[in-house]
Amino acid sequence: MSFIKTLLAACFLLSTSAAHAGKITVAAAADLKFAMDEIVATFKKSNAGEEVEVIYGSSGKFHTQIQEGAPYDLYFSADIDFPRELVKKGLAASEVKPYAFGRIVLWSATLDATKMNLTSLADPKIARIAIANPKHAPYGKRAEEALRAAGMWDKVEPKLVYGENIAATAQFVQTGNAQIGIIALSLALNPELANKGGYWLIPDSLHEPLEQGYIITKRAESNPLAKRFAGYMSSKPARAVMTRYGFVLPGENLKK
């Protein structure tokens, strides 16, 4: 009888633990892929049993999906204006929290991008240049702005191939489907890419700031895990990861 009581008690504790275990789904801009994976891993060390699923993609597409009822609990956008619009429409359970400024770089796995600049893209030997789709990807918009500011847009537009998001853009270059691309610094610093090619940092004076921000969505208004994870983004460990991947944190100065 004592064994049965012990077994029932264990089952009760397990079910209680499962009941209290939380789960959140995070929609995150593709430039956060490597940094966010590390942040989630460290967060879970002190939040055992909690489930944090991150889906990476285009900030613009997530913005549309959330308006259509997509089940995301937090939304990290590479363009802070997207979550601001969701706040205005009553689709957020928090104010917009700025978390970083992104930077764009020229990156190539086959060319020495460290010795190049935007004018180098006019070289007839370069036939395909990858950028994120400016229609919905903030990094693509900034790439177009930089090319126009440098007087290069009309010269290189016929060579452009467009990635669905900035991660897909980097993959185009990594796999050789484009000889060079304008990608996120955060991706270029990831060892997977850093060991295969170099980059040239595009001056931020050539484009509007890539100010990034996040919200807790209306869906997660009563989800304590969503609030804990949001708070963790301001912690020293999370900030250290973001800095290591080249993000400029709020209050810091952009380096030219």
Image: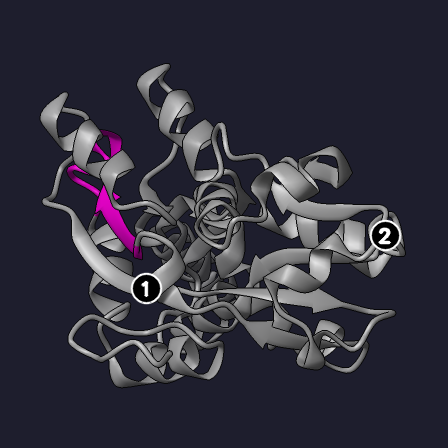
| Apparent side of residue 234 relative to residue 95 in the rendered image (left or right) | right
Q: Position of residue 127 (x, y in %)?
A: 86, 47
> Could you tell me if the residues under marks 1 and 2 are in contact, i.e. CB atoms within 8 Å?
no
Q: Earlier in the sequence, mark 1 or mark 2?
A: 1
Q: Residue at x 20, y 51 (%)?
A: 224
Asked if residue 221 is among those painted magenta in the image, a careful observer would answer yes
In the image, what residue type sits under mark 1? Phe
Quadrant of the snapshot with the C terminus: bottom left
Q: Residue at x 70, y 81 (%)?
A: 115
Q: Residue at x 51, y 65 (%)?
A: 3
Give SS at disc 1.
Answer: strand
Q: Position of residue 52 (x, y in %)?
A: 45, 54
In the image, what residue type sits under mark 2? Pro
Give SS at disc 2.
Answer: loop
Asked if residue 123 is among those painted magenta in the image, a careful observer would answer no
Give the number of the disc on residue 163.
none
Up-down relation of residue 102 to residue 141 (above or below): below
> Which residue is nearer to you in this view: 131 or 2?
131
Q: Position of residue 28 (x, y in %)?
A: 44, 48
Boundaries of the magenta span: 209-223
> Which residue is nearer to you in this view: 170 or 217?
170
Up-down relation of residue 140 to residue 182 (above or below): above
Q: Quickly name the residue at label 1.
A: 101
Q: Quickly name the residue at label 2.
A: 124
Q: Position of residue 97 (x, y in %)?
A: 17, 54
Q: Specify few, some or many for label 1: CA neighbours under 10 Å numbering under 14, 14-19, or 20 or more.
A: many
| Apparent side of residue 85 relative to residue 196 in the rendered image (left or right) | left
Up-down relation of residue 154 to residue 241 (above or below): above
What separation in Å lies between label 1 and label 2 (alpha carbons)?
A: 33 Å
> Which residue is nearer to you in this view: 160 or 97?
160
